[in-house]
């Protein structure tokens, strides 16, 4: 299990493990592999819907055998059934291999807020090709969630019903010393000013091209490349903000003697 690097490799081993259980093939995965991989994919809000119900309710090799044995008489039928039932998961994992930058963002956001921010990031990666409007909306939501999470942790007040993303980011930037006005070096002022422009642009892009608001008789439809840009910008900014915040917290922790 530990040597598996990608979700495709994990989905492939899950499939092999189940086939091994129902065909008595000892070269498939182990009962422990099945349990770990089953939980891994069920814990991911993106892949959970792709898991067949019979995998959800059968937690070990014996239960899988009890389910499959009376259902199909031959090993060939069982293999075909497993291939068919897990095809959506395997295809999804094969077609959604992430680039190194995406893996880095996922790693940091998972440590920061696995159930909230990271879940939204994973969904945005899934939707950026097939649902550009949804991906653009979620890209903006990721940054908003990161900013609110940090402000809540720092006990900085804001009105969640009125404040918009640019104002949220401005508050966070001030707390994290990321505001251009807090620096004297021109290059840092320019870069940090660019970060503010990206956040503002994502808010506008979401209002124009996302699925959060209705459009008129001639709606503007974003292409996959627009969603790719929005998601990648949001991920990069979220990574920068979170790493800055975590580094600040670490610097403020007292040394343990």
Image (cartoon, helix red, strand yellow):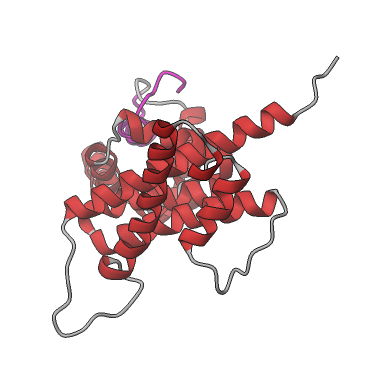
Where, by quadrant of the figure, is residue 177 drawn?
Answer: top right
- Rendered view: 232 above or below 37: below
Q: In which quadrant of the rendered image does the C terminus lie? A: top right
- Does residue 213 show up? yes
User: Residue sitting at 24 percent across and 59 percent down?
Assistant: 132
User: Residue sitting at 17 percent across and 76 percent down?
Assistant: 219
Q: Residue furthest right?
A: 257
- Rendered view: 126 above or below 221: above
The dominant secondary structure in magenta is helix
- Does residue 51 show up? no
Q: Residue furthest bottom?
A: 217
User: Residue sitting at 51 percent across and 61 percent down?
Assistant: 167
Segment tinted magenta in the rendering = 1-25
Residue 199: give x, y in percent of width and height.
40, 53
Where, by quadrant of the figure, is residue 91 drawn?
Answer: top left
Residue 242: give x, y in percent of width and height.
53, 39
Q: Residue furthest top?
A: 257
* Residue 19 is one of the magenta-drawn residues: yes
Residue 249: give x, y in percent of width and height.
68, 34
Instruction: Report the front residue among 24 and 83.
Output: 83
User: Residue sitting at 48 percent across and 46 percent down?
Assistant: 118
* Residue 145 is one of the magenta-drawn residues: no
- Rendered view: 206 above or below 47: below
Horizontal side of residue 183 vs 88, given as left or right: right
Q: In which quadrant of the rendered image does the N terminus lie? A: top left
Instruction: Report the front residue among 231 and 6.
Output: 231
Residue 55: give x, y in percent of width and height.
43, 48
Instruction: Report the front residue among 174 and 22.
Output: 174
């Amino acid at each position: 299990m530990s040597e598996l690097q990608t979700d495709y490799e994990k989905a492939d081993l899950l499939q092999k493990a189940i086939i091994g259980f129902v065909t008595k093939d000892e070269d498939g995965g182990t009962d422990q592999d099945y349990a770990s991989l089953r939980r891994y994919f069920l814990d991911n809000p993106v892949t959970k819907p792709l898991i067949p119900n019979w995998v959800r309710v059968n937690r070990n090799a014996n239960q899988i055998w009890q389910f499959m044995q009376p259902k199909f008489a031959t090993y060939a039928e069982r293999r075909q059934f497993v291939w068919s039932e897990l095809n959506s998961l395997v295809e999804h994992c094969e077609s959604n291999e992430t680039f190194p930058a995406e893996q880095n963002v996922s790693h940091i956001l998972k440590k920061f807020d696995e159930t909230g921010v990271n879940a939204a990031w994973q969904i945005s990666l899934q939707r950026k090709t097939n649902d550009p409007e949804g991906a653009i909306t979620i890209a903006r939501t990721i940054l908003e969630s990161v900013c609110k999470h940090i402000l809540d942790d720092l006990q900085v007040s804001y009105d969640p019903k009125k404040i918009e993303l640019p104002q949220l980011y401005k508050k966070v930037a001030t707390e994290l010393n990321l505001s251009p006005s807090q620096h004297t070096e021109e290059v840092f002022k320019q870069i940090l000013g660019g970060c503010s422009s990206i956040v503002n642009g994502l808010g506008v892009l979401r209002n124009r091209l996302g699925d959060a608001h209705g459009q008129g008789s001639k709606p503007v439809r974003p292409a996959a490349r627009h969603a790719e840009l929005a998601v990648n910008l949001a991920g990069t900014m979220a990574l920068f903000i979170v790493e800055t915040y975590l580094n600040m917290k670490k610097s403020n922790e007292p040394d343990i003697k």
